[in-house]
Image (cartoon, grey):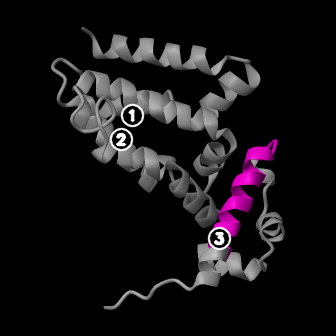
Amino acid sequence: MIQRKERADALRNREAVLAAADDLFARSQSPGSVSMDDVAAAAGVGKGTLFRRFGDRTGLIRALAEARIQPLRDAVEAGPAPLGPTGPPRERVLAMLDAVLRFKLDNRHLSLALEEAGSGSPYQAGHYTWWHRTLRDTLRRIPGVPDDDFTAHALLAATRADLVEHLVGQDGMTAEHMRAHLANYTAKILGG
């Protein structure tokens, strides 16, 4: 099957929509307050364009989050140590969790919207499944780590957007303190 190249105007519209949504989520007090109408108006496109392109609000949020996080995923899949696959396992786990946390700190409202989006379990979402599998596989390379599958879930839970929002947004914890606490907690779990 021949894959057709995307039309220039369709590509421009997609980029305009993602930029508008990104800006709206970054400025919103609550991710739930950003509507498809808001995004369409800010992007200068019709609401129908959004629905044809992304399906629904959840599809738009996923597309935006995926575009934002892709460079990080590329670094984890093929980048240099400590984040990339050639990094020593213990350092790689610490680097991955720190990178996920930094992403969520830098993209608080988008991350929160992504975790709130959809009707299914957030633990079955493609992005979560990928992070869990990658972390679990790295944990398996560290001797003495108990139940790598559960440990991967527990460590990722410490980076959930709702927790980040609570600690930073409500409790006033600084990003530096949160990163330090996560690193210390992870080091204790990994032992050694």
Q: Is residue 101 visible?
A: yes
Disc number at residue 102? none
* Percent coordinates x, y for residue 160 in the rendering: 54, 35
Q: Is residue 142 left or right of residue 57?
A: left
Secondary structure at numbered mark 3: loop
Residue type highlighted by circle 3:
Asp
* Percent coordinates x, y for residue 164 in the rendering: 62, 29
Residue drawn at 53 percent across, 57 percent down: 67
- The mark nearer the N terminus, 2 or 3, is 3
- The mark nearer the N terminus, 1 or 2, is 2
Disc number at residue 132? 2
- The mark nearer the N terminus, 1 or 3, is 3
Question: How many numbered callouts?
Answer: 3
Residue type highlighted by circle 1:
His
The quadrant of the image that shows the C terminus is top left
Q: Nearer the viewer, mark 1 or mark 3?
A: 3
* Segment colored magenta: 13-30
Q: Is residue 154 visible?
A: no
Distance from disc 1 to disc 2, alpha carbons, whole Å, reads: 6 Å
Q: Nearer the viewer, residue 157 or 17?
A: 17
Q: Is residue 159 above or below residue 77?
A: above
Sort mark 2 into few (<14), some (14-19) or many (20+) by Cα contacts within 10 Å: many
